[in-house]
């Protein structure tokens, strides 16, 4: 695959262009963005893009990206500095080094090992696919993690303490959220309740089948961590809950802005019949209102970024019966190190919400699939 830089057009559409030309737009008096696009050279390999890099993680120095391939049970190490595939990481389905096909997530440790988790599975591997350590969290806390009633959503390492591991969990029965603070050396843990999320329950709709619960639609929760904070945000509130790792304190912070308000206005019904199309009408109404995105962090400038969106729909539906958005208004919010809002504006060049995105070298890198080849749109904020 070849490398290249192209002009970024509305709708994340790629058109070829010579040189390093970029498109620059004055958004408001707040800031200006510059956009360009680069491609990753994967050689003879076909990268796994079916999940839109949903299961992918940056290393600590942002030099490479690990992309998990759940079809082949492996991972791809992508060199972001050289924009090429370094090599394929072999992982096994069975045996002492085996991992599940479906995992909840993974993260990269300071030793560049891969910590993979799922229900009852909490193991660390090296980048040759060999088991380094089984944390056995389910045995450490069997009354909490011994079954499938509680979902392990996300984990965080304390950069100041290699024996400290924090996890973000979801309790399915009442759709509640909590943190667990593990001391791996002593084998102890502390549960930290997150009452902040109780106020999001009004945005959830239970889906019933013949009177029985079969799922729900509504609140999305986006956990994120930098070196000293865990930030938990949702798609329905312009508000976050923060756990400070240094002070062991939990607090909330919110905003009410002219562009994005303080919360989503649309409140769905509490339950719907899953045998009808009513849930698709609810989804259309919800996504036509504001959806706040997750936070990302620029270590160099100590700034946080967040995309939010409002979508527009016609009558077209996809193969699953869901309404297809015709376009979206995408907003970018910029915050300082203390999460004070610095600037916020509509980004007219983006007509759909960015999928997987992160900050590298002071730019926001946004995943882009170009004819089944991996590219990134890079956005600079000035």
Image: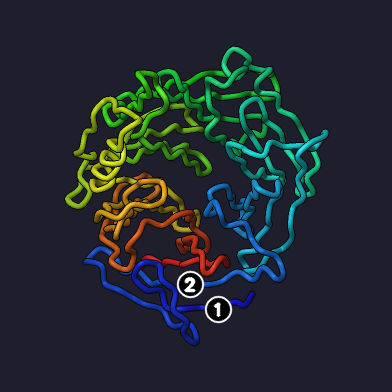
Where, by quadrant of the figure, is residue 265 drawn? top left
The secondary element bearing badge 1 is classed as loop
- Mark drawn on residue 188: none
Q: Is residue 53 left or right of residue 266?
A: right
Q: Is residue 333 visible?
A: no
Q: Is residue 114 left or right of residue 249?
A: right
Q: What is the crowding at mark 2: few (fewer than 14 residues within 10 Å), some, or many (at least 20)?
A: many
Asked whether the residues under the numbered discs 1 and 2 touch, taking CB atoms below 8 Å apart as contact, a structural biologist would say: yes
- Residue shown at 36%/33% (left/top)? 217
- Seen as rendered, the residue at the extreme top is 143
User: Measured along the vertical axis of the image, is residue 8 above or below residue 339?
Assistant: below
**Label 1 sits on residue:** 4
- Seen as rendered, the residue at the extreme left is 258
x, y percentage for residue 124?
A: 72, 37
User: Measured along the vertical axis of the image, is residue 221 above or below residue 89?
Assistant: above
x, y percentage for residue 357?
A: 47, 56
**Label 2 sits on residue:** 37
Q: Earlier in the sequence, mark 1 or mark 2?
A: 1
């Amino acid at each position: 695959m070849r490398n290249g830089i192209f002009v970024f057009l509305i709708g994340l559409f790629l058109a070829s262009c010579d040189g390093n030309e970029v498109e620059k737009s004055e958004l408001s008096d707040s800031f200006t963005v510059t956009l360009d696009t680069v491609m990753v050279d994967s050689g003879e390999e076909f990268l796994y893009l079916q999940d839109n890099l949903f299961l992918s993680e940056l290393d600590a120095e942002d030099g490479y990206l690990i992309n998990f391939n759940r079809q082949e049970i492996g991972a791809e190490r992508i060199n972001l500095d050289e924009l090429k595939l370094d090599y394929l990481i072999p992982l096994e389905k069975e045996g002492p080094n085996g991992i599940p096909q479906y995992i909840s997530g993974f993260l990269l440790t300071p030793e560049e090992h891969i910590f993979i988790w799922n229900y009852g599975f909490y193991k660390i591997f090296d980048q040759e696919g060999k088991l380094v350590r089984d944390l056995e969290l389910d045995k450490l806390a069997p009354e909490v993690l011994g079954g499938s009633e509680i979902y392990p959503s996300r984990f965080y390492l304390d950069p100041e303490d290699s024996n400290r591991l924090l996890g973000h969990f979801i309790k399915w029965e009442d759709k509640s959220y909590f943190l667990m603070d593990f001391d791996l050396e002593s084998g102890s843990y502390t549960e930290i309740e997150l009452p902040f999320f109780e106020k999001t329950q009004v945005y959830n709709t239970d889906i019933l089948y013949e009177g029985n619960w079969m799922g729900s639609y509504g609140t999305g929760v986006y956990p994120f961590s930098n070196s000293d904070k865990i930030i938990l945000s949702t798609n329905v509130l312009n508000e976050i809950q923060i756990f400070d790792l240094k002070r062991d304190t939990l607090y909330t912070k919110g905003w009410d802005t002219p562009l994005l308000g303080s919360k989503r206005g649309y409140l769905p019904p509490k339950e719907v019949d899953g045998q009808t199309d009513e849930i698709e009408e609810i989804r259309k109404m919800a996504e036509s209102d504001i959806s706040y995105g997750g936070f990302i962090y620029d270590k160099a400038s100590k700034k946080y970024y967040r995309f939010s969106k409002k979508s527009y729909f016609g009558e077209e539906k996809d193969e699953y019966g869901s309404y297809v958005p015709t376009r979206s208004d995408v907003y970018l919010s910029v915050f300082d190190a203390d999460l004070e809002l610095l600037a916020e504006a509509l980004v007219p060049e983006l007509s759909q919400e960015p999928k997987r995105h992160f900050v590298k070298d002071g730019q926001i890198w946004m995943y882009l699939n170009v004819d089944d080849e991996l590219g990134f749109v890079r956005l600079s904020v000035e």
